[in-house]
Amino acid sequence: MAPHDAADPPLEAMFKSYYNAVTAGNAMKPSSISQEKDVYAFSGADLLVDWAIENGMPVHGHTLVWHTQSPQWLNMNPDGTPLTRAQAKANLESFITTVAGHFSGRVHSWDVANEAFTDSVAEGVAWRDALRETPWYQAYANGADESSGEHPGDYLYDAFVCARLADPHAILYYLDFNEEYAGKREAMAGMTEEFNELWKTDARNTEPDRLLVEGLGLQAHYWTDEIKAANVEATIQRFIETGAVLSIAELDIPFGTYGTYLARTEAPTEDELAFQADLYRQLFEIFVKYADAIERVTIWGLADSLSWRGAGYPVLFDRYYDPKPTYFSVMGVVEDDTPPVTEPGEEPTPAPSEDAATPAPTATPPAEEPPEDASGFPGGLVAAIIAAAVLAVGLVVFFVRKKPKA
Ligand code: GLA
């Protein structure tokens, strides 16, 4: 969700009607909060966090350490060369202490680090060897004393420790994509287990029974032509073994694959929509099965037209903000534990309108093209992404508060 969405009556009403936890699409990323050393701008993020709190919705903070949408001062010199390890460590500590400290007590959880591993990780590769050579990694390599065990990937442990010290209330997550594949799954789990072991004897740990990496986030950016529910289940099972709680953090399932979806010019057929709805059903059946371990399911985009992958029609509502078969499929699982309400080929039932908080379908459809990403995310596709999340506390997956009238 973006701060301006809270001031857009149809979007605000839709959000309040269908969702009950908030992740900022961009407003809490490092580049949205600080462009210059020791200069912080919290107004956009504060607007969103205050709105969420006023409306009783927990906020998930996204994200503190990432290789993109992050200001250069954190880990690079003005000419783009890496800072030294000591300089980067000092900046990491001051950034996380300031940002996590600012939101302390107001956020439920944080993605402390996002996408630290390479896009794909081959099976059997040790987690340290699977790390992306991010600007943080390069700076931490610049002056690392490898003979005494220092490694460029140490920035990740430092980040988690700083976040814990700055906001002991927040649940600390590691988040990544392609998590459904065995190589990345093991890298994420291995790092989590190692950090939690290290933390047990860390002198800064004042809560011996508490993990350091307490949460693992599955980005869940899937594709209709690729996703296998069994792989997602295997990842959930492996992550549960680490002792962490889980979140399905950015779920969307566009039609096709990475290589094909942008070439698509036609709206999906009824059969395709039914196929997509069935994939959502399969996934939500798994999420419900492991509900004791999953504290949140977030859909990455309030409607297809507002999604960063809008060309693939990936989420639960269409460009008129009407519910799609995917929506009914999810509702069929989470509310009744029964098969999807919408059968293949059947028209979806309109959203409920008896409640003032529920918007009627908008008279003017939102723009077909996702709006420009104000934060300058490379790739040009990213809109003001709305992350709409589901019951964020209580370790239960539930998604939408109201069931549409039949
Ligand atoms: C990743 C990030 C998100 C978002 C998407 C693209 O998944 O975690 O914040 O930037 O990429 O929109």
Image (cartoon, rainbow, N blue to C red):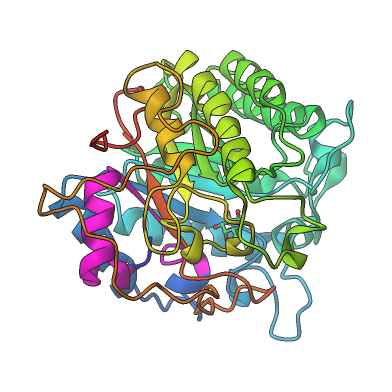
In the image, farthest residue toward the bottom? 79
Work out whether residue 94 can be spotted.
no
Relative to 225, is 190 above or below? Answer: above
Quarter holding the C terminus? top left
Please state the quadrant of the image where ligand 1 appears.
bottom right
Residue 120 lies, in percent from the top left, at 83, 43
As for residue 28 lying within the magenta part, the answer is yes
Q: Is residue 117 above or below residue 265?
A: above
The foreground one among 219 and 191 is 219
Tally of marks: 0
Residue at image x 39%, y 60%?
A: 99
**Where are the magenta residues, as a range?**
3-30
Tell me if residue 145 can be seen.
yes
Residue 259 colored magenta? no
62 vs 193, nearest the viewer: 62
Residue under the point 10% across and 54% down? 356
Q: Relative to residue 293, is residue 192 drawn left or right?
A: right
* Residue 281 horizontal/vertical position (percent): 52, 28
Image-based side of 354 in relation to 213, left or right: left
The N terminus - image quarter: bottom left
Image quadrant assignment for residue 338 = top left
Foreground of the two, 74 or 284: 284
225 or 349: nearer the eye?
349
Residue at the image point whose x is 62% and y is 72% from the top: 381
x and y percent of residue 172 in the render?
46, 38
Q: Position of residue 101 (x, y in %)?
A: 33, 54
Residue in view at x 71 percent, y 35 percent: 227
